[in-house]
């Protein structure tokens, strides 16, 4: 029926409309047609009468079954909830009360255990997990670096201490720990402001220092953005109402909460490593942690600074050449240190130190000898404008760099020899004459200024890490150094025996920062004999095993070993690196030997007869030192002709060759980074 209607509809239309219908009929002509059957509907009826739906009776349902209680799931669910609540509470308590000290300690234990286990299993000629010992060092260095950077604070201080001694570590550690000297992130102003309020009885920054952040007349100025930020503190510039420009060193607020946990975690890890690897390391930990604790006490730093200032001013050969910034005790607490602001050039800026002086004849750098820095009315107006336009990011201190000239290509016009002579004299006097040693003299803590005479003035800052030598130990160390220069092996053996050291030739080389050639070389000869005839992998492994044994021999008697040697060695290492960085302009070994010998007859604690004998020996000793001058100027001539490096470069090359026999790959270039 439907088809007929469609057909009749299409027949009344043009032929083009009918073609699809014809094609469809032709295609389906052979298909049998089936009839569509529609089922008949019927209504069924029942003979029984209708009954409404009723619920079943309880008796018909049978005995009831007990519902499932899910006791195990509910039990574990309660445990998870309780543990989550406890964990969250501990986390919040740790974060608020201890500045995440517990979490940092757990991270330390986990990483330390993982690294120790990796070394225990894979430190062998053929590691169990494949690869080489270098791969083991690399992944361990990465894990430890990430630990120190993630925890920050005092961990960065520990990392920097390791980095300064990293020349004796595998190259993989040296490259990784060179990054420990990057600037640490600074805290927000509102956080460091709390430190001032707490340490000064609730008074605000404006009340304590007499400054204004809106530029009020008669008030001082202070930058809320730090000029420098380190692991423990950050430094802000300020100008007090009386015109003094100061550096305000503020300890980061979390340090006080973290220091106890951090040092405890350090002790635990070192104890585990001492027992697991059979190395006498833990005996050094109490002394190291004591020094680190004192670094967080700014009142101790102020005392160190004042002591060094008095010693420098009392030494005729250094007064006028070295400057220690003034401390302002009325503003100093355990977490706040205020010192004189220093204008100068950092030691690492060789171009600015040696560039041509454009500041005028007879003039010197701003602030030399502690003269007050100029601050003109125009500088004050510029500061007020900066406060309005850039709050919390203001730069209020005027730039005093007119000596650079219009093209900023000028410099202080100083010679590297003048700078390094002053530096070596200063630290030699600390070690051999005074026994008061600044143990962190890296380039960032040394400023260079030009005196009106055209000579260099060296400014030493950051006096937190100090070592005080006893008169007996200072005398022994001076005698030891002098004996190294004269190849007095009997005295060297006697002194090292008193210090509990069983490898005097190895320790002598470590002290000089170059191979000691006056000993019997028994330690080195024994090592070379053991390494002969082995594969490179076995040789590398055995050499590092010998390095471990060498550490045991140097630290063989933990009770006798002077703990001060750790930081004195650090001082000498940094001074040697500074001299090399400046192009080896001075004979460092000769200068230090001269100070060591001179201190023996200038020591007021010795009897006058012994001092007179030492004075005669000092005259003879100076003739011996002439031999070192021959070697020094020979290498200086080669350096000038472009045939090689300076004296320190040659010393380091020979030290590297010797160190390889002990399984150490020295990489002193790391220091320059």
Image (spheres, rainbow, N blue to C red):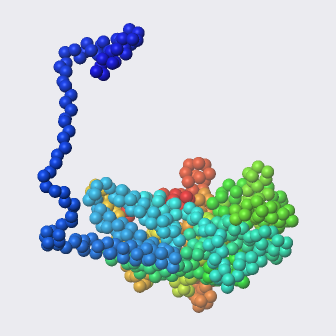
| Farthest-out residue, top | 15
Give coordinates of residue 79: x percent, y percent. 32, 75
Residue 7 relative to residue 209: left or right? left
Q: Residue at x 68, y 66 (%)?
A: 225
Residue 365 relative to residue 291: left or right? right
| Farthest-out residue, right | 377
| Among the 4 quarters of the image, the one containing residue 316 | bottom right
Task: Judge whether 48 appears above or below 308 on screen.
Answer: above
Q: Residue at x 69, y 77 (%)?
A: 338
Q: Quadrant of the N terminus?
A: top left
Tell me if residue 644 can be seen: yes
Q: Of 559 and 607, which appears nearest the observer?
A: 559
| Among the 4 quarters of the image, the one containing residue 378 | bottom right
Residue 429 relative to residue 127: left or right? right
Give coordinates of residue 345: x percent, y percent. 69, 62
Q: Quadrant of the C terminus?
A: bottom right
Tell me if residue 314 can be seen: no
Residue 174 relative to residue 613: left or right? left
Total marks shown come to 0
Q: Residue at x 65, y 82 (%)?
A: 199
Q: Of 647 and 267, which appears nearest the observer?
A: 267
Q: Of 659 and 277, which appears nearest the observer?
A: 277
Give coordinates of residue 78: x percent, y percent. 32, 75
Give coordinates of residue 593: x percent, y percent. 57, 72
Q: Residue at x 22, y 71 (%)?
A: 68
């Amino acid at each position: 029926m439907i088809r007929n209607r469609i057909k009749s509809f299409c027949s009344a239309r043009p032929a083009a409309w009918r073609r699809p219908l014809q094609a469809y009929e032709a295609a389906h002509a052979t298909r049998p047609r089936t009839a569509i059957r529609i089922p008949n509907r019927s209504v069924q009826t029942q003979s029984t009468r209708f009954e409404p739906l009723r619920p079943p009776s309880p008796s018909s349902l049978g005995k009831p079954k007990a519902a499932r209680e899910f006791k195990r799931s509910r039990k574990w669910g309660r445990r998870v909830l309780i543990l989550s609540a406890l964990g969250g509470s501990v986390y919040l308590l740790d974060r608020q009360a201890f500045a995440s000290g517990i979490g940092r300690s757990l991270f330390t234990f986990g990483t330390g255990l993982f690294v120790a286990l990796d070394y225990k299993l894979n430190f062998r000629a053929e590691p169990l997990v494949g690869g080489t010992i270098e791969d083991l060092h690399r992944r361990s260095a990465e894990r430890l670096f990430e630990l120190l950077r993630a925890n920050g604070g005092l961990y960065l201080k520990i990392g920097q201490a390791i980095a300064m001694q990293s020349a004796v570590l595998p190259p993989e550690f040296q490259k990784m720990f060179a990054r420990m000297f990057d600037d640490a992130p600074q805290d927000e102003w509102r956080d460091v402001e709390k430190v001032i309020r707490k340490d000064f009885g609730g008074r605000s920054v404006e009340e304590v220092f007499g400054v204004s952040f809106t530029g009020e007349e008669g008030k001082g100025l202070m930058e809320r953005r730090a000029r420098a930020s380190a692991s423990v503190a950050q430094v802000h510039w300020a100008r007090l109402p009386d015109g003094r420009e100061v550096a305000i060193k503020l300890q980061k607020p979390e340090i006080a909460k973290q220091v106890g946990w951090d040092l405890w975690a350090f002790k635990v890890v070192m104890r585990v490593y001492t027992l697991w690897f059979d190395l006498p390391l833990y005996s050094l930990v109490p002394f190291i942690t004591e020094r680190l604790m004192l670094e967080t006490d700014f009142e101790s730093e102020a005392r160190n600074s004042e002591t060094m200032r008095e010693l420098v001013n009392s030494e005729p050969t250094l007064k006028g050449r070295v400057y220690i910034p003034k401390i302002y005790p009325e503003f100093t607490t355990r977490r706040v240190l205020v010192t004189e602001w220093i204008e100068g050039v950092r030691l690492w800026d060789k171009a600015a130190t040696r560039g041509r002086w454009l500041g005028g004849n007879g003039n010197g750098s701003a602030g030399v000898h502690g003269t007050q820095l100029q601050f003109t009315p125009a500088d004050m107006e510029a500061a007020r404008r900066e406060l309005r336009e850039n709050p919390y990011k203001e730069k209020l201190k005027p730039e005093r760099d007119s000596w650079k000239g219009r093209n900023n290509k000028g410099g202080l016009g100083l010679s590297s020899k003048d700078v390094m002579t002053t530096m070596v004299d200063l630290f030699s006097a600390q070690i051999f004459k005074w026994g008061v040693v600044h143990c962190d003299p890296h380039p960032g803590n040394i400023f260079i200024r030009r005196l009106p005479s055209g000579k260099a003035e060296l400014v030493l800052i950051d006096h937190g890490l100090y070592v005080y030598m006893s008169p007996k130990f200072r005398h022994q160390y001076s005698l030891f150094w002098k004996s190294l220069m004269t190849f007095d092996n009997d005295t060297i053996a006697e002194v090292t025996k008193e210090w509990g050291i069983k490898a005097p030739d190895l320790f002598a080389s470590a002290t000089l920062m170059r191979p000691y050639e006056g000993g019997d070389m028994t330690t080195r000869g024994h090592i070379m004999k053991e390494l002969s005839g082995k594969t490179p992998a076995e040789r590398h492994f055995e050499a590092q095993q010998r390095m471990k044994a060498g550490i045991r021999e140097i630290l063989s008697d933990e009770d006798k070993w002077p703990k001060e040697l750790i930081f004195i060695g650090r001082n000498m290492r940094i001074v040697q690196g500074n001299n090399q960085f400046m192009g080896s302009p001075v004979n460092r070994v000769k200068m230090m030997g001269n100070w060591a010998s001179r201190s023996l007859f200038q020591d007021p604690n010795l009897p006058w007869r012994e001092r007179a004998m030492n004075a005669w020996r000092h005259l003879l000793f100076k003739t011996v030192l002439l031999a070192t001058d021959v070697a020094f100027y020979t290498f200086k001539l080669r350096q000038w002709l472009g045939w090689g490096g300076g004296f320190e470069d040659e010393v380091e090359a020979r030290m590297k060759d010797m160190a390889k026999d002990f399984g150490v790959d020295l990489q002193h270039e790391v220091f320059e980074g």
